[in-house]
Amino acid sequence: MISRSYTNLLDLASGNFPVMGREPRRRLPRVMTVPGNVSEFDDDQAYSVSSDNPSSVSSDRMIIVANRLPLKAERRNGSWSFTWDQDALYLQLKDGLPEDMEVLYVGSLSVDVESYEQDDVAQILLDKFKCVPTFLPPDLQSKFYDGFCKRQLWPLFHYMLPFTADHGTRFDRSLWEAYVATNKLFFQKVIEVINPDDDYVWIHDYHLMVLPTFLRRRFNRIRMGFFLHSPFPSSEIYRSLPVREEILKALLNSDLIGFHTFDYARHFLTCCSRMLGLEYQSKRGYIGLEYYGRTVGIKIMPVGINMGRIQSVMRYSEEEGKVMELRKRYEGKTVLLGIDDMDIFKGINLKLLAMEQMLNQHSNWRGRAVLVQIVNPARGKGIDIDEIRGEIEGSCKRINEEFGKPGYQPIVYIDTPVSVNEIIAYYHIAECVVVTAVRDGMNLTPYEYIVCRQGLLGSESDFNGPKKSMLVASEFIGCSPSLSGAIRVNPWNVEATGEALNEALSMRDPEKQLRHEKHFRYVSTHDVAFWSRSFLQDLERICVDHFKKRCWGMGISFGFRVVALDPNFRKLSIPCIVSDYKRAKSRAILLDYDGTLMPQNSINKAPSQEVLKFLNELCEDKKNSIFIVSGRGRESLGNWFSPCENIGIAAEHGYFLKWPGNKEWETCGQSCDFGWMQIVEPVMKQYTEATDGSSIEIKDSALVWQYRDADSGFGSLQAKEMLEHLESVLANEPVAVKSGHYIVEVKPQGVSKGSVAEKIFSSMDEKGKPVDFVLCIGDDRSDEDMFEAIGNAMSKRLLCDNALVFACTVGQKPSKAKYYLDDTMEVTSMLESLAEASEASNFSMRELDEAL
């Protein structure tokens, strides 16, 4: 039967996030954000900032969203019975949250609930467990979890590419649509209970990577974190995903993104750099990405275990006598232990081959060493499960036949369900735990083993003597960097792994004790509570400025993002500026060229006839002083704007200046000695030869090395090294070495768009025409100098006291300007309006002259 929370996949194919059906629902107690029914929230308001009504909840709450609720479900006598799953990470992380913080869970159940029971089950779970279940119809669940999650994302995030149809699953658009549809269902459930002004939302793992976009689209200032529990692949692997940018942009709608290791975070940051052009910054130990005015924090913190839960199970296991039972069973044997899920990435067969290698090379372990391999059931319909199982069973049989004898089997293979108590007992007796996963997000098995080998705290019934433990751990698992005392191995190197097993078993007890003590200190202090507490603290820190900025949404589908800017930053109103323009008597208009009058991606860089017409009309107005202020060379600018006789031009960021009505260029720099170019050019040529896609632009006053078409990572690295190289060799020269957007530029000191702006204002003031109207428009970093110069001119009284200033950037982005226009078309439209105003004014003046 189809659940009433099911969304139509066809609606999502367009990517426009259709409004879900408004079906009457049961009113939920306490957790409503505003008075009214939940159905009132069903319209996705892309520009909603926050709740406009008073909150009904006074304190902060945490809403934890994960694919599975931390519950166990069982049907008894025709009715459902639910209990907490004490081993669920999402339940355990509550230990690190403030005691007075209420926690709600949103997720799906591990069992199918008939549609006619769903409302009753949902109410029970909300009332008794503060859980909000998301019910997925079977066909959607299959496509979402078994399809897109387990057959496309899971393999790719574990470095497996679908080279053939049989080896992995090729990308299927319908599975992606199911993934998006499921994420939207989770979104629906979150908005039923969220109070956007007070609640934190913490989303977990790769199943819900596009959920942040849905939530950010509805609540622009929502406080939201995301933690990825799987690896994040290198950019070379990730870039093969057809929906790579959609997922990256969705994740960036979070405030804080967490990873287990720096490697995973580094891969994510590299993907953002290569695919979205975003660069990260590290400040006071925190890593952040600037994304449309918002700072997206990057958190690196491996998850820990719940010490209390492990101790509790250890106590119960001891009471059951499991430990004593296993000690008798393996008396006289040295036990190595492996506990893994049935998955192609766990490297189980590589572990068996390493055991075989050790027995071959070190015969003293034959008849003594036993590898107990416990295999948990697969978590879904993973790839090649049957083939992997057959391979493992074949290796076990072969090794046992070769080295086994009556009363001894080197491999004990357990593929039936094993209770938690029994696993704890195996940890107690194991001399060494072996993890040979070829790729794994975290893997807490080593942590649990270390705690169990320490024994029950304060118990005298546990084994006496110094505590010791040994770990042979793959270097490709998330916990490996935290366990510096483990013997790290490349599991693909079977021979080296076999030697590592021998080293672990042969190591002297004092060394084992020291390694164990070091590991236990770390594991006991970096538990799951420490992890969740640290994540919440960083989330609070990153969200502290949420209500200090103006926020609004932009874009459709997964191109949606929230722009967060200064409250005083607003769009330039053309009617308002035209009104002020008409009243002004002495106007200075400063215009950048590329990206302002001319689109950056235009092939023909010459100005259009339309732009020249408007500029000419503005220049004819005697109240105007019009300047083109550009980084381009004077020759090209002079040729392009030759039809505008009364326009002023500042070329090469103001080094060369041509005043309106004057054909001669003057030099504004401090020095005319360009001997430094003979030093700089050979250096730049050397880097150009070594950096494919880079080039040198030679200007009259400057040299610019550009690497826009080079590999972004390598180009950035080369630019940084070149910057240091040039700063060193030019230390005594009167030049400035600066890096910009894909450029390194060397130019004379004191040359900037800001300095030429001040020169223009000063000149007009000296001529008795102090400026009472300033319009300054630009689009890039060099134009920020002009915006800053306007403020300096005001303080130096180079402008009239009541001067009207319109500093305007092109595009909605952080800027020193107070106004913005969206693109070059809007700039042209505004110039047209000003030109029309000047034309009307000139016409009126001519009529007046004729009348006189």
Image (cartoon, rainbow, N blue to C red):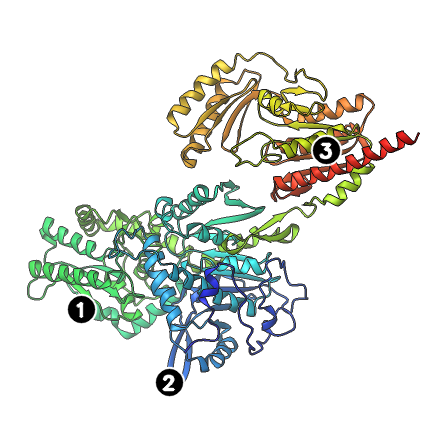
The residue that mark 2 highlights is 76
Please state which amino acid type lies under the numbered disc 1: Lys
Q: Is residue 238 left or right of residue 392?
A: right
Please state which amino acid type lies under the numbered disc 2: Arg
> CA separation, marks 3 and 2?
75 Å
Q: Is residue 293 left or right of residue 93?
A: right
Residues at discs 3 and 2 in contact (Cβ within 8 Å):
no
Q: Decide: is 471 above or below 426.
A: above
Q: Residue at x 24, y 63 (%)?
A: 385
> CA separation, marks 2 and 1?
38 Å
Please state which amino acid type lies under the numbered disc 3: Gly
Q: Decide: is 230 above or below 270.
A: below
The location of residue 850, given as percent across then percent down, is 89, 30
The residue that mark 1 highlights is 328
Crowd band around label 3 with a 10 angstrom C-alpha radius: few (<14), some (14–19), many (20+): some
Residues at discs 2 and 1 in contact (Cβ within 8 Å):
no
The location of residue 725, given as percent across then percent down, is 46, 23
The location of residue 719, given as percent across then percent down, is 46, 29
Q: Quadrant of residue 841?
A: top right
Taking depth in this image into account, of 469 and 231 the one nearest to the observer is: 231
Crowd band around label 2 with a 10 angstrom C-alpha radius: few (<14), some (14–19), many (20+): few
* Any part of residue 382 in sight: yes
The location of residue 400, given as percent across then percent down, is 10, 61
> CA separation, marks 3 and 1?
84 Å
The residue that mark 3 highlights is 791
